[in-house]
Amino acid sequence: MNPTTNAEIAARNSDLRIALLLGIANWFLFLDHIPHNAVNALTLRNFGFSGATDLFVFVGGYTATLIYAGMALERGFLVAATRIFKRVWQLYAAYIVLFVIYVELISYVASRTAAPEIINEFNITGFIDHSIRSLIYGLLLQATPLNLDVLQLVIALMAFLPIVLFGLLTLPNVTLVASLALYAAARLLDWNLTSYPDGHWYFNPFCWQLLFVMGGWCSLISNRYADAIRAMQAVPALRAAALLYLLFALTIVASSRIPMLAEMVPDSFVNTFLPNEQENVEPYRILHFLALTFLFTLLVPRDWRHLHSHVLQPIIKCGEEWLAVFCSGVFLSFAAHLILITGPNALTMQIVVSIAGIAAMTGVAYYVSWSKHQDYKSAVRAPS
């Protein structure tokens, strides 16, 4: 609880790379949520083992820990814990509103259009047959309509942030080891939360918490090892190893889409790494994300001048207002999918709906930011 620690946290809070990465994650999640869309071939999941969800969870843990650690150091841990639970309530309320409107909207569209198959596609069959029961399970976060599972995961992770935050502020390395132990135990013992009407959570919170905690650990502790990290990044062998692993992951993933490449890759490798299931976040997936992080921080330092360029401002703004952008992206991805399955699903239309959706999400981000700015303005006119 010294001034240096507060200064370090304040400096990291002003790091534009955080908002940039959250904005990229939001855009990629939107594109990934549109099936049969050629544009989502450009998202992160097509170039390796990790994807937009990994980025979203890691940076989310990094950001949340920074915000509430600073609050804990300045105003006490109890205040920080109550603010965390307030944020959890906001996320939960957003989820419930999304859940109710989303299910109702899909049901209405399915009944009014020639596309009843979207009820099964969006995993809401049980909600139509047993609406009251489904609503109860939805309130308990046990219902999993398609595309809401990421927000569901974030709520679960944020609910346990007070425990994680206390550990990171007192015994950070022990907390990270405990997180790793929980990850290993969940994988070995098949721990997960149940979902309705059957099955488990698509993103197992007992496993995905590792990326969340790693993000928090990096936000508070990485400065202690800054010299060691820079020394590691300066070692050509480590940079080459990270790059080679990324190229290996790209080759494996691309082999599932390129027949000529598939003939060159041994079946043993393909069967080991594909399909790349997301429920328990495989170790090689985490390693891939860490390799990306290692090279990203090397190529994009905190003072990278392009972070202030006009081209990147829309992405950064979407990262700053990530919750509103994510919620709008859920509906926009459904609208884009509906347009593609009820109209001409040509490449041109796929590009149009993708660009239009991203533009709408960006518009939401700028409006929310502008609205907040208006709320902060003083209602009392300054004396002349």
Image (tube, grey):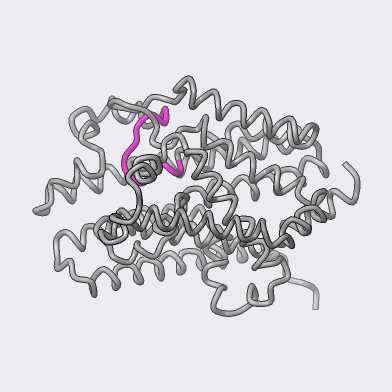
From the image, give the main secondary structure of the stretch colored magenta. loop
User: Where in the figure is residue 249, as x and y percent of width and height?
Assistant: 45, 53
Nearer-the-camera pick, 177 or 321: 177
Residue 267 image-quadrant placement: top left
Q: Left of 6 or right of it: where is 142?
A: left
Q: Left of 112 or right of it: where is 54?
A: right
User: Where in the figure is residue 99, as x and y percent of width and height?
Assistant: 35, 41
Residue 160 image-quadrant placement: top right
* Residue 379 appears in the figure: no
Q: Is residue 63 above or below residue 299?
A: above
User: Where in the figure is residue 55, as x and y percent of width and height?
Assistant: 53, 52
Q: Residue at x 74, y 31 (%)?
A: 167
Q: Is residue 232 above or below residue 128?
A: below
On-image quarter of the C terminus: bottom right
Q: Is residue 382 above or below residue 122?
A: below
* Residue 140 appears in the figure: yes
Which residue appears farthest toward the top when viewing the image? 189
Q: Residue at x 73, y 60 (%)?
A: 235
Q: Is residue 35 above or below residue 76?
A: below
Nearer-the-camera pick, 241 or 305: 241
Nearer-the-camera pick, 284 or 4: 284
Q: Left of 270 or right of it: where is 176?
A: right
Membership of 146 in magenta stretch: yes
Residue 209 image-quadrant placement: top right
Magenta-drawn segment: 139-151
Number of disc labels? 0
On-image quarter of the N terminus: top right
User: Where in the figure is residue 251, as x and y percent of width and height?
Assistant: 41, 57
Membership of 175 in magenta stretch: no
